[in-house]
Amino acid sequence: MSFDFDATVVGAGAVGLACGRALARRGLSVLVLEEQPHIGQGVSSRNSEVIHGGLYYPTGSLKARFCVEGRRALYAFLDSHKVDYRRCGKLVVATEAAEVSRIEAIFAQAVTNGVENLEHLTGAQARTLEPELNAHAAILSPESGVFDSHGYMLALQGEIEDAGGSVVVSAPFERAAPLPGGGFTARVGGEGATEVTSRLLVTAPGLSAQAVAARIEGYPADRIPARHLGKGVYFRLTGAAPFDRLIYPPPIPGALGTHYRRDLGGQGVFGPDLAYVETEDYSVDPAEREEFVRYIRRFWPNVQADRLTPDYAGIRPKLHGPGEVQPDFQLHGREVHGIDGLVALFGIESPGLTSSLAIGEAVAGMLAHD
């Protein structure tokens, strides 16, 4: 049977576009569907734009593997497409003696994960690099950075389209069903509602992952993981940025915690914190500033509250609730749901942006023989 496309990808965020690119690079015709009027308006537009080194993630996990592989591929991609970035490095800081053992454990994990060029620093050495920093000790990860995530996604879209594929916005995925002889038919809503057929189907819609999977005929409901929404807010600093490098205290349960970055425009930004919510609420309560100041003062004693202004919020598509163990990325193939030619992605939160090229390659590899 002939299909409209070889592969349909649901979701035009960084991961969906990276999946589309990986499939297009294998000579497949690709359709990427996005319900919003522009690409990258979901999780991909509400993050820290940090390129993670790969320090924290458990040995053998997809997060550990994809973060390191994805980071290496990402810098090469940004260079080749002339997308702006700054490999500024990261300091993971023990702000008191009690935290030293925690950052030493992070160092050991990072070495196991294959992260390059790590250094142990004393507090004095860390302050030589960043004079305003409060540090009892620190880890320096020179491979970490910040980048223009939207420029990156536009470059991914360009590669898909250069290969003859299509990225269609304002095109919500409504449902899909496997075809008797293999492949899928998908119903696409919006102004030009239609049905399309493809041999392969990939779902990478971020916060909508569970809802999209539930709209695929034959997807076992008991194989769709529970969804939890982890909200994080950011505050922006007016005036001069205090640090050049990324500054991270030890992680909090379930997330990396409130950290500092100097963005590509030269401004300091702090966040995200973590609060579990029931709905997609992107408001930022100015009253949270007091808690931010208390937390930031641990590593930047000179922070002034009146220089912090509410900025934006993001929501992570978490697979765990408060107090639960943070799980790995989930890439569901035929062995999970029993449907040929389908890969469904769940829980692609941090370090999903850094990992996106590696995730795309893994998904394309899973589908190579379908």
Image (tube, grey):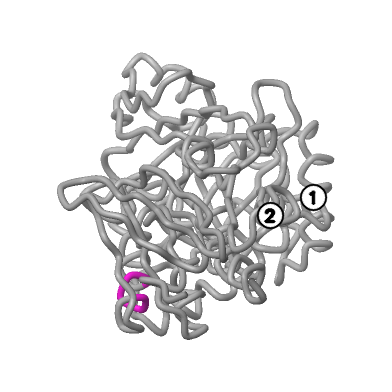
| Foreground residue among 58 and 336 | 336
Q: Earlier in the sequence, mark 2 or mark 1?
A: 1
| Foreground residue among 135 and 86 | 86
Task: Name the residue located 72 percent from the left edge and 40 percent from the top edge.
Answer: 327
Q: Residue 243: where, in percent of width, then height? A: 45, 51
Task: Name the residue located 56 percent from the left edge and 65 percent from the top edge.
Answer: 181
Q: Specify the segment rendered in magenta.
A: 156-160
Q: Residue 354: where, in percent of width, then height? A: 54, 60
**Badge 1 amino acid:** Pro
Labels 2 and 1 touching (C-beta < 8 A): yes
Secondary structure, magenta segment, majority class: helix
Q: Secondary structure at mark 1?
A: loop
What's the CA distance linking mark 2 and mark 1?
8 Å
Pointer 1 residue: 58
Pointer 2 residue: 63
Q: Is 81 one of the magenta-colored residues? A: no
